[in-house]
Amino acid sequence: MKLTLKVWRQDGNDSDGRFENYELDGVSEDSSFLEMMDQLNEQLLSQGIEPVLFDHDCREGICGTCSLTINGYAHGPEDSTTTCQLHMRKFRDGETITIEPFRAKAFPVVRDLVVDRSAFDRITQAGGFITVRTGSAPDGNALPVAKSDSDKAMDAAACIGCGACVASCKNASAMLFTSAKAGHLNLLPQGQAEKDKRVLAMVSAMDEAGFGNCRNYGECSAACPKDISLDYIAKLNRDHAKAKIKKFFS
Amino acid sequence: MNLNSKIPEGPISDKWDNHRFSSKLVNPANKRKFRIIVVGSGLAGGSAAATLGELGYHVDCFCYQDSPRRAHSIAAQGGINAAKNYQNDGDSIYRLFYDTVKGGDFRSREANVYRLAQNSTNIIDQCVAQGVPFAREYGGLLANRSFGGAQVSRTFYARGQTGQQLLLGAYSALSRQISAGQVKMHTRSEMLDLVVVDGHAKGIITRNLATGEIKAWTADAVLLCTGGYGNVYYLSTNAIGCNVTATYRAYRRGAGFANPCFTQIHPTCIPVSGDHQSKLTLMSESLRNDGRVWVPKNPEDCNKDPNEISENDRDYYLERKYPSFGNLAPRDISSRSAKEACDEGRGVGPGGRGVYLDFADSISRLGESTIRERYGNLFQMYERITGENAYKRPMRIYPAIHYTMGGLWVDYNLMTTIPGCFALGEANFSDHGANRLGASALMQGLSDGYFVIPYTIGDYLASTGAGSISPDSSEVKEVMESVRQRIDLLTSCKGNRSSRSYHKQLGQIMWESAGMARNAPGLEKAIGQIQDLRDDFEKNLLVPGNSSNLNAELERAGRVRDFLDFGELLCRDALERNESCGGHFREEFQTEEGEATRDDENFAHAAVWEYKGDGSVPARHQEELKYENVKLAVRSYK
């Protein structure tokens, strides 16, 4: 395949970015999108141009490191797929592909296509845990958990923290991520003791990080490589309202 | 080199208890006087950092990823073993211990493995309490599945993403300690050297990958939880960033490296599709329950549509060679048989490196919907990567490097031969011998981090007392200077070859000569080839840009440089181990039927390598392994 790649290049968050066009020939349909980027970088290296930086690691769709907005879609046009699992047979020979970073105020650009998603870590640090001292846990079967609750918690826990939800939202809201993380724990009996504190803390950490408000556009869930449902946002809204009311009256 | 394993006295079931009682303690008020460095944030590092922080130590935790939640433990699919015996099917701590020692082909340390089996039950309790959403039965209790190498059902799992869920559990515990101020997290930070002062590990040197800043960190102890070295083969199921630098640099500073030749090859991965390939993807081994493995009998049929090859012209080689285990023969044996078939020119797909895994029989017997129910997600993943529909056409699979059993030598306390430097998880060598059983890697990482190191580090710290050195001291500055020089060498070369091209070439040499089957002439040749490649690297490497900002080429060049040295060490170890055991198959040591021949008389030991300087051959030491509880026996799967 022969491709024209329109790639966003930026030296740092404080510098201006720009698109650069690169021609790339001899791309195999069997290669993954990131392998195509590897090939581009080998070519740039031989031309004396600095390779394009992008985040990636496991390349099997689970670590959540890879990002990229491809032709306007976070993780590209294929449903339920991370960029690393996207393959070039999904593109046409001769196509021009636009490649940008995940854009959001709360995700400052580090360089080129690499962004800083540490805001997600801060949301988890605020309350995305169950306080349990190592060694103090009761037997694993001491507390039965209804299979339906456990399955719903698992659906939420499948979030890989990639940030596609933020990148695809007009408001760059992190509600889908935060609601998946809070929902996973709030749905389990183990997570009940800290539930109110958790939702209040996580939502305020999310706001402090500079993410926008949720308007229920639903772009986040459509872009999510793990198909996290909008239901978790509704649940977080409910849990948050309840926690605020309880706090007001306590 | 002092290889005192410090195995406690007493019967095997009492050793850990006895040891915990006789270990010195650090009084709670004194814990805050100690600083501990944890390198790596996977299951071992994340759980260790969280637990040590919770105990009151000051912890600095480092990872090269942009978040501790992305460490490669996350990619584990199958599950985690524990001797809970919830199925009432005859499991026990002793049985898990026995299976692990036997599965490791009698090259692991009994006392460590027993402790691992003991801790396994606590791990499940801990993870459930953290909210890890393990699979459950309709009654609300935990579900189990079976796994290779065991006759009981003891594997706990969270769909096909057990690794991610356990890591998120450890990460949540770590996050709690970060917000409590007990752990300081340093992301996008790569350890480039270990600081050893008066024989004790006292700190590390890191490079901030985003800013390029080289910085020294000092502490009272250093924990290396940096995973395995499978990427020395270039193509593996490891993440792209996984590397050997931390453990290899510790080796150069005096830590013994044990059994580097013990590498595990997983039989069911998606084959290489072309030159562009950057990594290999694993398909769960469970597929072999319903798929039949075959290749064409005649090499000229290899390019035909598999559905047009008649039954008579197919060779179901596993069923033919191992009638009682058939398609479920163990990992090492299935992998080797696939290689043999391809070496005979009967491989299929690009480059002739693949065999068929055919579901047609199961589909006609059980119906497509049953197969879809069992393996739907795997068939989908296969289609995404290969563009082929495995319901209509047999899957192509081929073995790939997956895990490394070798690692830094550690004693019972998980301390390397450098006092104060510990190694946890895949980075150490002690628990899996020459072959790891499925669902045991997650168990070991969490056992080491949650339940071993919190006790054993106290003994070391209480003996030495608090007193980390200043990052400005001359010993630290010296190491820092050497790191700077190494980086300058990489950036100043300005040749014409990328580090990736060297990595690829090294991987080809390793796979060819030190992969699934090894022999002495091949290994000797590989050592020469690696040395030549290293010379070429030093002359012709091209690293663009500079070292003062994010520079992926520079990162890779540093890692490849260490892999070039380490690959040679791996080959040397394979050359010296004149036997076949577990993942190490030497063609000279096999029976007439092609089965591995272990040599317990001469090789029932861990081979521990001591660095002797660049250009010098490292020294090989031995820790004799004593089997007092499990009787040494030959594995047979006929």
Image (cartoon, rainbow, N blue to C red):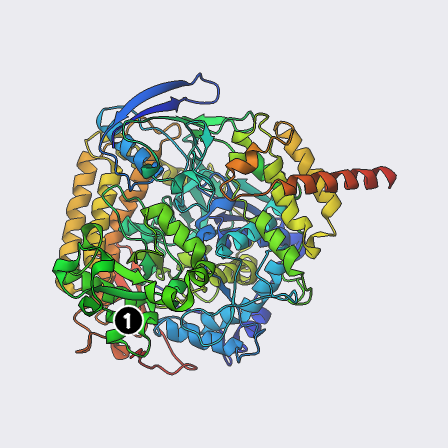
Residue nearer the viewer, B116 or B474: B116
Please identify the quadrant where the N terminus of chain A is shown. Answer: top left
The residue sitting at 33% across, 82% down in the picture is B633
Residue at x-position 27% and y-position 34%: A39
Q: Quadrant of residue A48?
A: top left
Specify the quadrant that holds the C terminus of chain A.
top right
Q: Nearer the viewer, residue B16 or B517?
A: B517
> How many labels were placed on the picture?
1
- Residue B440: image location, x then y, percent: 45, 65
Q: Nearer the viewer, residue B563 or B509?
A: B509
Secondary structure of the residue carrying numbered label 1? loop
Circle 1 crowding by C-alpha within 10 Å: few under 14, some 14–19, many from 20 = many
Q: Check the image and report above or below for B141 versus B571.
A: below
Tag 1, which chain?
Answer: B
Where residue B311 appears, as percent x and y from the top left, is 22, 68
User: Left of A47 or right of it: where is B457?
Assistant: right
Asked whether the viewer can see residue A63, the reply is yes
Name the foreground residue: B198 vs B461.
Answer: B461
Q: Determine whether, in the image, residue A175 is placed left or right of residue B48.
A: right
Picture coordinates of residue B217, whole percent (x, y): 48, 41
Task: Examine the rendered structure and indicate whether residue B522 appears above or below residue B148.
Answer: above
Q: Is residue B625 left or right of residue B446?
A: left
Instruction: Work out whether residue B458 can be spotted.
Output: no
Instruction: Inspect the image, locate mark 1, and give the three-letter code of the amino acid beneath it.
Output: Cys
Q: Which residue is mark 1?
A: B581
Q: Quadrant of residue A242?
A: top right
**Picture coordinates of residue B67 (x, y %)?**
50, 41
